[in-house]
Image: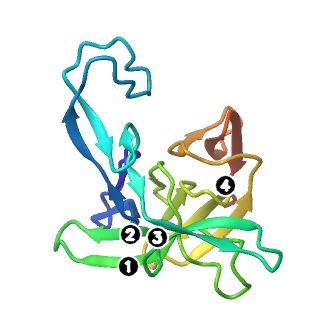
Amino acid sequence: MNWGGAAVDPTTGYVFVNAHDTSLVGWIEEKRPGQNYGRGTEGSTIPYDRGSVNGAGPYFTFSAPLKDETGRTVANLPCQRPPWGRLVAVNANTGEIAWETPLGLTEALPEGKQLTGNSGSAGPTVTAGGLVFVGATTDRRFRAFDSKTGKELWATRVDGQVNANPMTYQGKDGKQYVATVATDVLVAFTLQE
């Protein structure tokens, strides 16, 4: 699970999370004088920061290039079997997984093999009407799932990557809306009755 957090439906006792299934290699190490660790830590007095096999800074991911027929790299894919990202419902009353489904497409793969799940950082939102909304993928989609079964009910392509938790609210018109940020654009949708 990443920084997006979880959503909880108190009526079913389900907790919904966006789970990542990709490998990262990294560790915390003592900062060396003059070492640039990036991410705004330049000049910081913190004694430790993250390191990896690539040196100071971001974690290393194990991936391999996927090339098209011309030899051009069209994607870098994790080096383990998919799914690489999932939407998971956990029954908080029992601790059992109620359902899980791959979350995200890898469009560089052939039709019928694209539902691999992929990484993103946002969490889901659940409504009292039994819908789980989530972006949290690199395929620029915003989705709604049935909270009881995990079936994808709706998806739409947006103009940016959705790395913000969705929110829901009642508008002045009395209608329920769900909204999220796609890159730097706010997108909102009306829920139908």
Taking the view exactly as shown, the residue that stands out farthest to the right is: 70
Question: Could you say which is closer to the camera, residue 148 or residue 27?
Answer: 27
Numbered mark located on residue 84 in the image:
3
What colour scheme was applied to this rendering of the protein? rainbow
Distance, label 1 to label 3, CA atoms, is: 16 Å
Q: Amino acid at mark 1?
A: Trp
- Where is 127 relative to 167, above or below? below
Position of residue 92 in the picture relative to residue 12 (left or right): left
Q: Earlier in the sequence, mark 1 or mark 3?
A: 3
Mark 1 and 2 residues: CB-CB less than 8 Å, in contact?
yes
Callout 3: helix, strand or loop? loop
| Residue 186 point in image, percent of width and height | 69, 36
| In this rendering, the label closer to the viewer, 3 or 4 | 3
Question: Could you say which is closer to the camera, residue 134 or residue 59?
Answer: 59
Q: Which residue is mark 1?
A: 99
Question: Could you say which is closer to the camera, residue 17 or residue 63?
Answer: 63
Q: Which residue is mark 4?
A: 191
